[in-house]
Image: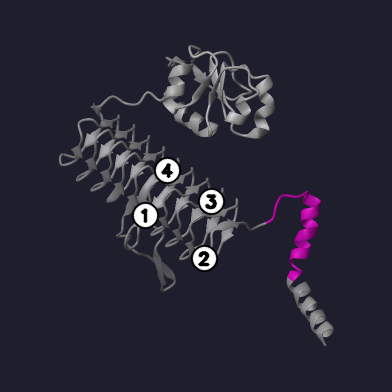
Amino acid sequence: MKQSFSYTLSELAGRVCAELKGDAGQLISGLNTLQGASAGDLAFLANPAYARYLETTGASAVILAPAQAETWTGNALILENPYLGYASLSHLFDTDRGKPVGVHPSAEIASDAEIHPTAAIGPKVVVESGVQISEGVRVDTGAVIGHDSVIGRGSHICRNVTVCHGVFIGERAIIHANAVIGADGFGNARADGKWHKIAQIGGVVIGDDVEIGSCTCIDRGALGDTIIHEGVRIDNLVQVAHNVVIGKHTAIAANVGISGSTRIGEYCTIAGAAGLAGHITVADHVHLSGMAMVTKSITQPGAYASGTGIMEAGEWRKNAVRFRKLDDIAKRLKQCERRLDN
C-alpha cells in the first residue's frame, strides 16, 4: 500500500526556516520537478536553466531563492539555497518504511554478538561472533556482518551487503545494496612463474555520516587499514583498493577505480569513470573530470582533466592518426627551433 503524506506549507517552512509567501494552509502531499509537478506538489528551482518552467508548472508551491521569488505570484518557500531546502524536506516524503525494532526469527545471530535492543535486524541476516551493533542500527534482508565488526549508532546496512570481518563502521553511515566492505585486497607476490597470495591482515575503518553506493567494493588493508573519513560520499560501482585513504567530505561518482595505497584529500570531487594509480597523493579541494586518468600525485587544489572530448567519428579517426605522429612532430619542431636560434 502506497504511503500518503500531507503537510501544510507553514509546517514545511518551519522545518527549513524558510520565509513563506502565499497560503500558509496550502496542503502539500509530494515533491516533484517544476515540469512534472501537479496540484499538491512542492517543486523547487535550483538551476536557473529551468526558470522557464515556472510559468507553466502545476506545483502548488515552489522553493525559490529571494531574487526568483520577487516576480513569482504563487505560493513559495524562500531560501538562499533552494536545493538544500529540497534536500532537507525530501526526508519527509521518503517512502522507505524501515524495519520494526528487534531481530527477525530467520536471522542467524552468534551467541556472543552484542545487538542493541533498538536495532532492527531483518530476515536472513547473518551476524557472526564478536559483532557489536549499536543503538538504532538497521540491517536489511540478507546482509552479512562478519566476525568482530562494529556498526555505529544509527547506521543502515541495506539488502545483501557483505561486511567482512574486523570492519569498523561509524555512526549514521549508509551502505547500499550489494556493497562489499572489507574483502581481500589484490595482493600477490610473483615467483617461480606463478602468483602467491599475500594475506590481507588489515581492516576497514569508515567514519561517521559516510554513504556508500550499491555494488561498491572497499578492500581491507594489506597492513594497516583502508580508511574512509567522515562525510564521504561514494557512488555505485566504485572500487577502492587496499590501504586507500579518502579525506572527509570527498565525493566520488560511479565507476571510479582507486588503486592501492593512494591518499585522496578532503573536499575533493571525482567524476565518473576516473582512474587513479596506486601510491599517489591527491591534495585537498581537487576536482577530477570524468574519465580522468591520474598517474602521478596532485599537490595543488584545482580542476584537472585528461582524455579527449567527444567528436564526430570521422574527425576522431583523422585525429587518432595524428596522435601517433605527435612525437615525431615534436622532434621536428625542436629541430626547427634550434635552426631559428642559430
Whole-percent x and y of residue 58? 62, 16
Does residue 96 show up? yes
Q: Quadrant of the N terminus?
A: top left
Earlier sequence position, callout 3 versus callout 2: 3
Q: Which of the numbered marks, if any, corresponds to residue 227? A: 1
- Per the image, label 2 sits on a secondary structure element best described as loop
Q: Amino acid at mark 1?
A: Ile
Does residue 95 show up? no
Cα distance between the residues tagged 2 and 4: 25 Å
Q: Which of the numbered marks, if any, corresponds to residue 297? A: 2
Whole-percent x and y of residue 177? 41, 37
User: How many residues crowd around disc 1 within 10 Å: few (fewer than 14), some, or many (20 or more)?
Assistant: many
Please give the name of the residue rendered at 58% of the width and 29% of the height, measured from the top-left corner.
66
User: How many residues crowd around disc 2 within 10 Å: few (fewer than 14), some, or many (20 or more)?
Assistant: some
Q: Which residue is mark 4?
A: 212
Please give the name of the residue rendered at 57% of the width and 57% of the height, measured from the top-left corner.
302
Please say whether residue 321 is one of the residues in the magenta stretch.
Answer: yes
Earlier sequence position, callout 1 versus callout 3: 1
Query: Mark 4 and 1 residues: CB-CB less than 8 Å, in contact?
Result: no
